[in-house]
Image (cartoon, grey):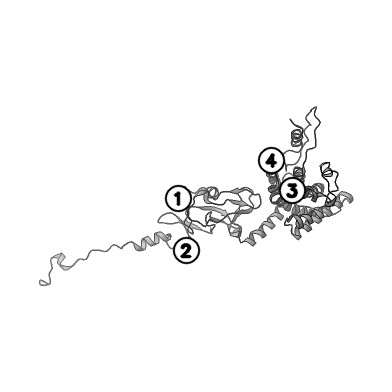
């Protein structure tokens, strides 16, 4: 086993799966080789985030002020490291306090005076073009202030307020990794980063402040996009953030087109898979799957839709229409909207067929049919 592999094995034994609380440190493996610290920038930042998740995860016990303290310290460290990783991806001189005095030797030996967090934010916004809003910059600056006060002066403050601010930055940072770092990593490092993020997400979902801040941001995005009516409860994380893409073409080939993606946990589903999941206990009768709006066999039942989250709905995974109540047509069995149904409920096709069917008329019977004639009276 190589030195880096040995270190990772030892780290897993001590810390467990990323996002889990440490219960008891495992004994270090005996080896004649000297373990080496092997934490390049992105891996280092993700390791700090694993510690943040560990301290803020409320599933096993209440978060204590001490947990918040170390979460803030390690979250600030993650911000510094990951911001510098993005600056390195743009140009190696950007991580120096004074880029004009940068040298490869200082970078390789890690003896440089590196850029501060505030300057890193400015360079990311102004040089790299990373979209950091004023609100996000304010939260990052406040985190730096909290960290400095905790580190040097012990910071007497409301722990829940600090935790909430940390949650806002944690939300931003996960978004930053997904959008700003992954595209710039080589394949092995990107694979490792994706794997680490997958391991962190379960713990992230348990952090109340993180969930609240992230869902508030996602809610604002969905409202601005006009996508609330086609956003449903995610089957993976149970957050109301799974956005279904409407299909405009008729017919349902090639697995029904664009995948639905959760804005919270990033899990994606093919529309066909969602339809099968939400068919529930309904009998496998094809007419019951047909959407009364678009006519495609893509109708799911008991779906929670963000725009009408108080009750479950029937939902079409093709045209993304939600229906409050549907009943089977008395004629063919396909689902119809009871609001527009007659009595008995019939779909439009069955109603038309009934209207065009000729009525049965009794044959005409005249006096001659009974042996009478006009002459005989």
Residue drawn at x 76%, y 60% as measured from the top left: 134
Label count reads: 4
Whether residue 68 is visible to the viewer of this picture, yes or no, is no
Residue drawn at x 54%, y 47% as measured from the top left: 273
Q: Which residue is mark 4?
A: 188
Identity of the residue furthest to the left in this view? 376
Of the numbered discs 1 and 3, the one sitting upstream in the chain is: 3
Q: Marks 1 and 3, how far apart in space?
A: 53 Å
Q: Quadrant of residue 244?
A: bottom right
Q: Quadrant of residue 214?
A: bottom right
Secondary structure beneath dot 2 equals: helix
Does the residue at mark 1 contact the one at mark 3 (Cβ under 8 Å)?
Answer: no
- Image location of residue 301, percent across then percent down: 53, 53
Whether residue 92 is visible to the viewer of this picture, yes or no, is yes
Q: Marks 4 and 1, how far apart in space?
A: 45 Å
Q: Nearer the viewer, mark 1 or mark 3?
A: 3
- Image location of residue 285, percent across then percent down: 45, 49
Q: Which label is found at residue 99? A: none
Secondary structure beneath dot 1 equals: helix
- Relative to 162, say whether 358 is above or below: below
Of the numbered discs 1 and 2, the one sitting upstream in the chain is: 1
Q: Which residue is mark 1?
A: 286
Does the residue at mark 3 contact the one at mark 2 (Cβ under 8 Å)?
Answer: no
- On the rendered structure, is 295 left or right of 20? left
Secondary structure beneath dot 3 equals: helix
Q: Marks 2 and 4, how far apart in space?
A: 56 Å
Q: Nearer the viewer, mark 3 or mark 2?
A: 3
For label 2, the crowd category at 10 Å Cα-Cα, with few meaning under 14, some 14 to 19 and many 20 or more, is few
């Amino acid at each position: 086993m190589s030195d880096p592999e040995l270190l990772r094995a030892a780290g897993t034994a001590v810390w467990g799966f990323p996002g889990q609380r440490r219960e008891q440190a495992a004994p270090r493996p005996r080896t004649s080789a000297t373990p080496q610290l092997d934490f390049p920038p992105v891996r280092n930042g993700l390791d700090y985030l694993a510690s943040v998740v560990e301290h803020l995860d409320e599933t096993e016990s209440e978060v204590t002020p001490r947990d918040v303290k170390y979460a803030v310290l390690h979250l600030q460290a993650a911000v510094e490291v990951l911001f510098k990783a993005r600056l390195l991806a743009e140009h190696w001189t950007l991580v120096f306090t004074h880029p004009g005095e940068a040298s490869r030797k200082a970078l390789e030996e890690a003896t440089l005076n590196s850029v501060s967090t505030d300057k890193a934010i400015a360079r990311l916004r102004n040089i790299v073009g990373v979209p950091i809003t004023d609100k996000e910059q304010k939260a990052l600056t406040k985190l730096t202030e909290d960290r400095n006060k905790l580190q040097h002066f012990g910071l007497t403050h409301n722990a829940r307020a600090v935790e909430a601010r940390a949650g806002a930055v944690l939300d931003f940072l996960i978004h930053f990794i997904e959008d700003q770092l992954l595209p710039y990593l080589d394949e092995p490092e990107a694979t490792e980063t994706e794997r680490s993020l997958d391991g962190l997400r379960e713990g992230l979902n348990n952090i109340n402040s993180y969930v609240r801040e992230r869902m508030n941001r996602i809610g604002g995005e969905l409202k601005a996009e006009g996508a609330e009516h086609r956003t449903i409860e995610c089957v993976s994380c149970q957050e109301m953030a799974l956005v279904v893409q409407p299909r405009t073409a008729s017919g349902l080939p090639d697995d029904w087109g664009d995948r639905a993606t959760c804005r919270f946990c990033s899990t994606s589903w093919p529309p066909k898979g969602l339809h099968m999941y939400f068919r529930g206990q309904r009998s496998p009768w094809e007419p019951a799957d047909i959407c009364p709006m678009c006519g495609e066999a893509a109708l799911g039942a008991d779906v929670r839709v963000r725009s009408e989250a108080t009750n479950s709905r029937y939902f079409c995974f093709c045209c993304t229409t939600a229906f409050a109540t549907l009943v089977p047509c008395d004629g063919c069995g396909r689902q119809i909207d009871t609001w527009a149904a007659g009595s008995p409920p019939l779909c439009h096709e069955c109603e038309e067929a009934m209207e065009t069917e000729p009525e049965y008329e009794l044959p005409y019977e005249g006096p001659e049919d009974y042996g009478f004639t006009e002459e005989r009276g």
